Image (cartoon, grey):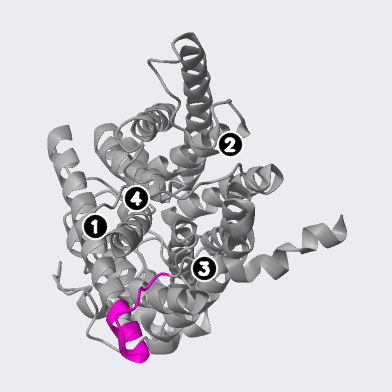
Amino acid sequence: MATYPLDVAPPLLRTPEGKIASEDDLRQHPERFFQGSDIVWVTVAACLVLQMIPAISMFYSGAADRSSTFTLLRMPIITAAFCTVQWYLWGYSLTFSRSQAESGASWQIYSSQVQDLVLYRALVRPVGAAGPKIPELLYAFYQGMLACFTPALICGGVIKKFRTGRFLVFILLWSLFVYYPVARWTWSLAGLFDHHRVMDFAGGTAVHITSGTAVGAVVLFDAVERHGWGIFAHAWALDAPHSLTNLVLGMMLLWIGWFGFNGGSALGGNLRAVSACISTHIAASSGACAMLLLNWTLERVAKAWPKILRVADRRGAKVSVVHFCDGAVVGLVAITPAAGYVPVWSAGCIGAISSALIFFLKSTVLQDLMRSDPLYVFLIHTGGGFIGMVLTGCFARQYVVGFDGYSSIPDRSVAERVGWQLADALLGFVWSLAVTTAILLLLKVVTSAFTRKWTRLFDIEVDAKLQAELEYKERIE
């Protein structure tokens, strides 16, 4: 029977062997080998991540125009449920199976073992590279929340594009062929970039770059399908946000949930988790303030020189709480890979720098490039993910990583760290772009085969079917 090393045991350990336990020992007396505080914190963190899914529903539905609000309110929640079932059936087994854990890095995108299907053996085996461990069932629960939240982010980029059924087929294939492999190379002990000690604390590449790039692929595929290679000749006309109340409330719930998203990635109730939570809050605050001040400055400059400078934000030239919310989300995205690696003082720099760079891209370079992505999902998540990965390499400090009592970072120069960070981010970007495009082509071929003619994958009339639901407002009034 297999035994497992437990590097740090609880203070009340009552077993004579101290640090070695069989699987039967772990099942019969888990309280002897796992810290109760770690279990409680990671469980709460997973629940906070789950709360982010209705939060993103509120945020997207509030930011979109009136004709899209019902689609964006329901789709993240439905998506999370379907992705949960897939994660339970085979997602965890393919991503985090222990098959390669003892043999170093592997180029395999999936595990070759099947013993963890339907979480069959994911019970009490200890998880963690060193130091205190948590039960594998808890780890599967926490990672499952990330696997649900990541596809939910994509919903904001499919306004007036996908039918619900087609989108669910797409997102399940996307999770299987994009998210699971990237999560494996990022966090699994058998993962290539985990082996090379790339620093991605909570998913700069695995969550944000992959989901944002998927939205970019959908937008470009849709534009090519409708307009040939004159892909930038068309843009959706986005009205003012449908509900500022939903927008602000959704953003604040996301802000709260992000403490679980980042703090839970410490996999324990330790000082590193505290540092990650504080860094998260500071980055969000500085990002929000920076975006608000930059838009205020742009508004003043635009008034002074209206013929020279035009305001690029389609949601209005006036400074509003929308810009504040955008900046907060940018800061949260950028701090995601960095939260457990960088000192608290640098979190403000990361939030402000990322917000300023996204503001510049939105106002200039990408002003016309992504006009069919009215909620800026590609820009905020892919751009913020790249910025966060690079700044993680710049600001990471060993003493912060060591707050949990056992972790470390490789002894490399800043340039070497940034190089590895960029390699991970670029590979995630290319993988997501290529595989997402391949999935869209496959769905187009299958759809055309059923209709016996070359059919467009996306349906511009999809939201017209929601007009009956939209009449609720008129009936109430």
- Image mark for residue 200: none
| Quadrant of the drawing holding the C terminus | bottom right
The answer to whether any part of residue 339 appears in the image is: no
Q: Position of residue 423 (x, y in %)?
A: 16, 50
Q: Position of residue 250 (x, y in %)?
A: 63, 49
- Image mark for residue 428: 1
Using the numbered discs, state the Cα–Cα distance from disc 3 to disc 4 in whole angstroms: 34 Å
Q: Are marks 2 and 4 in contact (CB under 8 Å)?
A: no
Disc 4 marks which residue? 204
Q: Are marks 1 and 3 in contact (CB under 8 Å)?
A: no
The amino acid on which the numbered mark 3 sits, given as a three-letter code, is Glu
The amino acid on which the numbered mark 1 sits, given as a three-letter code, is Gly
Q: Which span is picked out in magenta? A: 444-458
Q: Earlier in the sequence, mark 2 or mark 1?
A: 2
Using the numbered discs, state the Cα–Cα distance from disc 4 to disc 1 in whole angstroms: 10 Å
Q: Secondary structure at mark 3?
A: loop
Q: Are marks 2 and 1 in contact (CB under 8 Å)?
A: no
| Up/down of 37 relative to 170, above or below | above
Disc 3 marks which residue? 461
| Up/down of 252 relative to 141, above or below | above
